[in-house]
Amino acid sequence: MNKMIPTALLLVSSAFSGATFANFTAIECNDCSSAAAQQQAAKVLAKQDKPVYVVDFVNYQVSKYQQEGEAVTAKAMTLSENLLINNHYSYRKSTLRSAN
């Protein structure tokens, strides 16, 4: 009985944390310049607050963009974000690396 409560709390907390990582916005911009990728991200960021990941399968790169006030800036990606993007596009049989 004493082990059931911590186990239940652990399961509930892991379920909620996994759901937040599974929700991301990625757009494709193949063989784009950094300025074109930033413009594509700015269009999406005008409608939402979450970071946007711009994926380039020609150059095997992914970039993360965030809105800071009026400006859209490129941000460094964490390893877990990079793995999340690669797992999402695993059917493409290519590994994307962070451009930032």
Image (cartoon, rainbow, N blue to C red):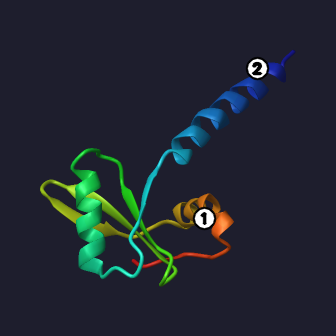
Q: Which residue corresponds to the image point at 42% horizontal and 76% vertical from the top-left?
A: 30
Residue with the mark numbered 1 = 83
Q: Which residue corresponds to the image point at 29% horizontal and 53% vertical from the top-left?
A: 44
Vertically, is 25 above or below 7? below
Farthest-out residue, left: 70
Residue neighbourhood size for the residue with mark 2, other residues' Cα within 10 Å, grouped as few (<14), some (14–19), many (≥20) = few
Q: Quadrant of the C terminus?
A: bottom left
Q: Amino acid at mark 1?
A: Leu
* Residue 26 located left or right of residue 86: left
Vertically, is 40 above or below 4? below
Is 95 or 58 nearer to us in this picture? 58
Provide residue 69's location: percent of width, then percent of height.
15, 54
Look at the numbered disc 2 and give the secondary structure of its residue.
helix
Provide residue 36's location: percent of width, then percent of height.
26, 75
Look at the numbered disc 1 and give the secondary structure of its residue.
helix
Farthest-out residue, top: 1
Q: Amino acid at mark 2?
A: Ile
Q: Which residue corresponds to the image point at 63% horizontal and 76% vertical from the top-left?
A: 94
Q: Residue 47: which quarter of the image? A: top left
Residue with the mark numbered 2 = 5
Provide residue 98's location: percent of width, then percent of height.
47, 76
Q: Quadrant of the N terminus?
A: top right
Vertically, is 27 above or below 24? below
